[in-house]
Image: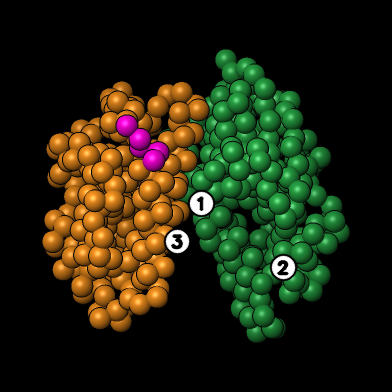
Amino acid sequence: MATGDVKLIGSWASVYVMRARIALNLKSISYEFLQETYGSKSELLLKSNPVHKKIPVLIHADKPVCESNIIVQYIDEAWSSSGPSILPSQPYDRAIARFWAAYIDDKWFIAVRSILTAQGEEEKKAAVAQVEERTVLLEKAFIDCSNGKPFFNGDHIGYLDIALGSFLGWLRVTELDAHHKLLDETKTPSLFLWAERFRNDPAVKPLMPETAKLAEFAKKLFPKMQA
Amino acid sequence: MADEVILLDYWPSMFGMRTKIALAEKGVAYEYIETDPWVKTPLLLEMNPIHKKIPVLIHKGKPICESLIQLEYIDEVWSDTYPMLPSDPYQKAQARFWADFIDKKLYDPAWKVWGTKGEEQVAAKKELLEHFKTLENELGDKAYYGGEVFGFVDMAFMGYYSWFKAMEKFGEFSIETEFPKLTQWTKRCLERESVVKALADSDKIIEYACVLRKKFGAE
């Protein structure tokens, strides 16, 4: 049974930090949130994550765990007797969840990001088209994984819901920048409805950043934005 | 039953080698189907429509893609023998972290060291050696990355072993000279039949790398 102090080093704006916080909420774990200042890295961060020097870092009983998807799995395993299961129970379903979580990070979000960094209208249009194509794949993945249930993980939100849902704030900001809906109720109806359910989940709702605040922050990272 | 497990793989793939090592360590019989990823056979496209890449592990007709995901799957399905990951959640997280580090950080500079020339190659070599140093420090004086037992991280890293000679040749450096602990560790891993059988011949890899270098314009 896991006991001890729980700290999370992160930032209110970070998608990856949000994943860890959702997981901690799901397991009803109280923790100390250590907000990093944008533009600098605290000594604790550098000491706890010397390899990547990035947030989030979960510190449990003084031991650091890094990388958002690894942190979420750790939370699921360390507090396995508390709250719902975050990963599916069957090995094949776990492999599928991990596959799509990797796709979301390596392919889908890279495409979303290219909208924010696009130079000129042509590049932006091409980036939007690529995001739409990849979102359609996620729609199909949702239908396959959810099997008629409300979430990728079934009745409760889980690993894959968290992997994609943590991006919803940034997706909204990108939609404003592109003047184009990226999660469209006609093109990806199941995902559109899933997103609403995810945003309203009690483990998620208090963590979703305000779009206006996030858009303002985004301009610091992506000066070419037009939101 | 051998026909329950199929592996689509290509002989030089460092990723396929990881999966072969894992299957061998667990004593799982499987059918191996040599699949050139440049050719895109109907079976490959059916089993990995998203990435169209190897390796693909097919178990009872269902595909599992991405080598580290395959390793976790193999460990979970054939859980009654030879655990590849520690059972302690913190140790498991550390193993996943280092396998992820190897995946995120090594691939790019590694292929640039044998696949490019000039400034691009010089920068890649510097980066690669930095990452090897990090991995050497992480290994420290342990027998394996997991401690006493050959496991997940060792498999993730040893997949690259066949390509070491190519990196050394084109990058003009010696792993033995620069990284004595890593060298000892590779020798230890090479005592395992599962590893020896999974790896490709280093000289054949160099020949293959030469072909690719011409294709990429590095020659």
The reply to the same-chain question for discs 2 and 1 is yes
Identified at 61% across, 78% down, the residue is A126
The color chain B is rendered in: orange
Please state the horizontal and vertical placement of residue B109, each as a whole percent of the image. 39, 62
**Of the residues shown, which amino acid type is indicated by label 1?**
Ala
Q: Is residue A221 left or right of residue B33?
A: right
**Of the residues shown, which amino acid type is indicated by label 2?**
Phe
Question: Marks 1/3: CA distance?
Answer: 12 Å
Q: How is the image coloured?
A: by chain
Q: Quadrant of the C terminus of chain B?
A: bottom left
Q: Which mark is residue B193?
A: none
Relative depth, front residue between A127 and B33: A127
Contact (Cβ within 8 Å) of mark 3 with mark 2: no
Q: What residue would you read off at disc 1? A: A102
Q: What residue would you read off at disc 3? A: B50
Contact (Cβ within 8 Å) of mark 2 with mark 1: no
Relative depth, front residue between B139 and A222: B139
Q: Which residues are magenta?
A: B137-141
Q: Disc 2 vs disc 1: which is toward the camera?
A: 2
Please state the horizontal and vertical placement of residue A84, each as a whole percent of the image. 63, 27
Label 2 environment density (alpha carbons within 10 Å; few <14, some 14–19, many ≥20): some
Q: Is residue B79 left or right of residue B92?
A: left
Q: Disc 3 vs disc 2: which is toward the camera?
A: 2
Please state the horizontal and vertical placement of residue A115, each as a whole percent of the image. 66, 71
The vertical placement of A28 against B12, above or below, is above
Identified at 58% across, 71% down, the residue is A130
Contact (Cβ within 8 Å) of mark 1 with mark 3: no
**Of the residues shown, which amino acid type is indicated by label 3?**
Ile
The color chain A is rendered in: green
